[in-house]
Amino acid sequence: MVNQIIIADVSTGGLLAFLFGILVVIALIKTARVVPQKTAFIIETLGKYKKTLSAGFHILIPFIDKVAYKHTLKEQAIDVPPQQCITKDNIAVEVDGVLYLRVIDAVKASYGIDNYHFASIQLAQTTMRSVIGKLELDKTFEVREEINQTIVDAVDKASDPWGVKVTRYEVKNIIPPQSIKDAMEKQMRAEREKRAMIAESEGQRQAKINRAEGVKQESISLSEGEKMKRINEAAGRASEIKLVAKATSEGLKMISTAINEPGGSDAVNLRIAEQYIGEFGRLAKTNNTMIIPSDLADISGFIKTASEVVKNQNFTPKNSDNQQNQRNRTSKKSSSEGENQG
């Protein structure tokens, strides 16, 4: 009987020791706290806020102090679920986004609002509906930056009492209805075809301009070439006339000198007679009908008259103009006498 009582006492003492050991372990766990980097622990004493623990090792009062809230101080990316928004032109679009925020005051984040994540998402969605409702569908794709900034300003202003700072908001997708997608695709296809036709017409226009410019340059080059050709031909003819005139002048001077020499008159008479007879011979070869003077004896008279005219001419090298005028008058006179004799 005594032995049974002793065994019972030993068993009770061991159980109490075991329970005490467990209690000590729990107390140590509750007392010693290690806070990670960029994390804040909110400590309450008997249900009342006591302090905020930053990163490091901390000792709490067992069964009196407790960690009520844990907040990360890192920037958080919160997905905003898709929602239906009505644009200004009454088109329903589905819009979603991503909200970026971080806790800057752990106390306000703990006691200022029950769940700042949920509140921030709801505020971002309502602001999104409000902003989209002021814009037409086409504008919603063009002014995403303005939409993002408007949502950031609205949510940041509302979340200030919550100890939360909204850094930015990004619209991920704006999805219109399928019918609107089809219409937009047709519009885009028509716009692309329009740009292609404009580009093609511009190319054709530029090609025509280039061809016209080439024809113009070709015409100018041809006209310039023709101009230079005519100038060169005129210069050649002028040079030819000058050379012929100079040669004629030199010849006349030589004839004048020869006439003034002894026997020159007889040579002139002989030359004139030869030319007279030669012209009649050529006329007989080229024509079937020949007109001859009525009295062949007049030939000698014509030669005598021509010789007298030649003798009366004053061929002097110093006065070339007078020599030319005299030659012209002699030719006219000879022609008139020839006609009278004929």
Image (cartoon, helix red, strand yellow):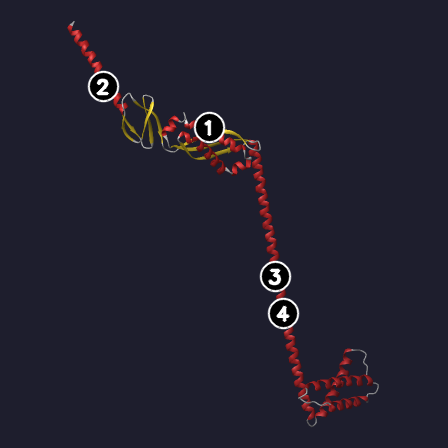
- In percent of the image, x 15 and y 7: which residue is there? 3
Relative image position of residue 125 (x, y in whole percent): 48, 30
Whether residue 175 is visible: no
Q: Earlier in the sequence, mark 3 or mark 2?
A: 2
Q: Nearer the viewer, residue 88 or 8?
A: 88
Q: Residue tagged by mark 4?
A: 229
Quarter holding the N terminus is top left
Residue at which label 3 appears: 218
The answer to whether residue 225 of the structure is visible from this angle is: yes
For marks 3 and 4 on the same chain, the one whose residue lies earlier in the sequence? 3
- Mark 1 = which residue? 122
Task: Check disc 2: other Cα within 10 Å, few if <14, some if 14-19, many if 20+.
Answer: few
Determine the residue positioned at 65% across, 79% down: 242
- The local crowd at label 3, few if under 14, some if 14 to 19, many if 20 or more residues have their Cα within 10 Å, is few
Q: Is residue 100 left or right of residue 29?
A: right
Q: Which mark is residue 21?
A: 2
Quadrant for residue 186, please give it.
top right
Label 2, label 1: how many angstroms apart (C-alpha)?
49 Å
Disc 3, disc 4: CB below 8 Å? no
The percent position of residue 105, horizontal first and vertical second, equals 37, 31
The amino acid pointed to by label 4 is Lys
Mark positioned earlier in the residue sequence (2 or 1): 2
State the SS at label 2: helix
Residue type marked 3:
Glu
Q: Position of residue 145 (x, y in %)?
A: 48, 38
